[in-house]
Amino acid sequence: MTAASAPATIHGFEFRSLGTAAPVSLADYAGKVMLVVNTASRCGFTPQYAGLQQLHEIHAGRGLVVIGFPCNQFGGQEPGNAEDIAQFCERNYGVSFLLSEKVDVNGANAHPLFRFLTTALPGVLGTEPIKWNFTKFLIDRQGIPFRRYAPTTAPAALEKDIEALLG
């Protein structure tokens, strides 16, 4: 994909859902606020699944869509297959928000969505690559990346920004 053909919004991307591998178009969520997070089951930040689930439960009715993208690029902390990941998330955190198939978020094989997000919202000192699991990207209702949050930022700390985007 060339820069000229790159989507202007997140709505130009799709991913495959965890378990079914069915394609999911982000265009289906046009008009919604989205929270995109790279996740892992064996990370020190894994308990953030609970906070992400809470945001989903509180705000889904008002238009928030939380999407987790399991990733094994950081310390091999997501080694399981789709079934392992789904069972872990459900059993330990009651996750009912959307989960993608396992993806890469950095490098030559990075999912196109993450190449777009890291370019649109660089991290600390303007660096694009994601540094660790549970980096979060908040997207407005028009599909435009709004803000990037560090792995250390608890999901509850996003509440004010989510409220502002939900209106």
Image: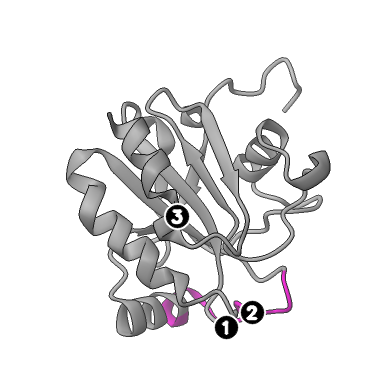
Task: Give the x, y percent position of residue 27.
Answer: 39, 30
The CA span between labels 1 and 2 is 5 Å
| Circles 1 and 2: CB atoms closer than 8 Å | yes
Res. 58 in view: yes
Identify whether 145 is placed above or below 51.
Answer: above
Q: Residue at x 67, y 31 (%)?
A: 120
The CA span between labels 3 and 1 is 22 Å
Task: Give the x, y percent position of residue 142.
Answer: 41, 22
Which stretch did the figure color magenta? 74-84
Q: On residue 42, which mark appears?
A: 1
* Amino acid tagged 3: Ala
Number of labels in the image equals 3
The CA span between labels 2 and 3 is 24 Å
Q: Judge the density around disc 3: few (<14), some (14-19), many (≥20) Cα neighbours within 10 Å.
A: few
Going from N to C along the chain, the mark reached first, 2 or 3, is: 2
* Amino acid tagged 1: Arg
Q: Is residue 16 left or right of residue 129?
A: left
Q: Judge the density around disc 2: few (<14), some (14-19), many (≥20) Cα neighbours within 10 Å.
A: some
Q: Residue at x 49, y 47 (%)?
A: 15
Q: Residue at x 73, y 45 (%)?
A: 123
Going from N to C along the chain, the mark reached first, 1 or 2, is: 1
Q: On residue 157, which mark appears?
A: 3
* Residue at the disc numbered 2: 77
